[in-house]
Image (cartoon, helix red, strand yellow):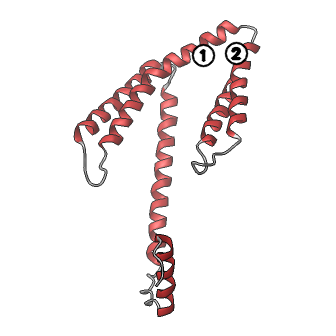
Amino acid sequence: MLFWLGFFLMLVGVSWARMGPSFQRNRYYKPIFIIGLLCVIGNLWQSQDQSRNIEELLNHIVDFLPWFFTGFLGYYLVLLGAPTYMKVRYPPLIIGWIIIFVSFYLYFEYNNHLSVTDILVSLSTVLGISFSLISFFFLVRFVENRIPPEGIAPELTDSEKEFVRKIISKNIGVDEK
């Protein structure tokens, strides 16, 4: 239990390190990450049967790495081939989807502890999430269609135009004459 607490604290620490503007990151990420790292290390040192815990952790890592890295590569290729500015790159897109399906196969191959009940629970969860997202989409669409569109904004007055001109010229460094 302490191992997973440490793992999630490390994850929170890394996430917090990426929060905020680039010149001023969240300053609490280092202590949270260090506490998480100490929890992970402390859990491995604390147990009486340390070799069993390390062996179990290594087995989890070995079961995790093949499908994770193939899935990561597949998702990277799909994102690389996805239409950006209306340009689709079909070779990385198709290869990426094939690699993603291979990663699903590897997931089931390396995680043989899955049962039919686990798969049915997962599928019902996916169906529930899909149903709620579709419901949300249609509700937002329904509400947005009921709101009448706003009229055309009136044209700027001369004083407003002069104010905007002064702000723009000040920002681009043009002297007023």
Q: Nearer the viewer, residue 55 or 133?
A: 55
User: Which dot marks residue 17?
Assistant: none
Callout 1: 10 Å neighbours few (<14), some, many (20+)?
some
**Mark 1 — residue?**
57
Give the percent coordinates (x, y) of residue 21.
59, 51
**Mark 2 — residue?**
44
Q: Which amino acid does label 1 sit on?
A: Leu
Q: Which amino acid does label 2 sit on?
A: Leu
Give the secondary structure at mark 1.
Answer: helix
Q: Quadrant of residue 108?
A: top left
Residue 37 in sight in this render: yes
From mark 1 to mark 2, how far is it between C-alphas? 10 Å
In the drawing, does residue 83 fall left or right of residue 120? left
Which mark sits nearer the N-terminus, 1 or 2?
A: 2
Give the percent coordinates (x, y) of residue 9.
68, 33
Give the percent coordinates (x, y) of residue 104.
39, 28
Placement of 50 over or under 98, stated as above or below: above
Q: Which of 122 and 147 is in front in this view?
A: 147
Callout 2: 10 Å neighbours few (<14), some, many (20+)?
some
Proximity of marks 1 and 2: CB atoms separated by less than 8 Å: yes
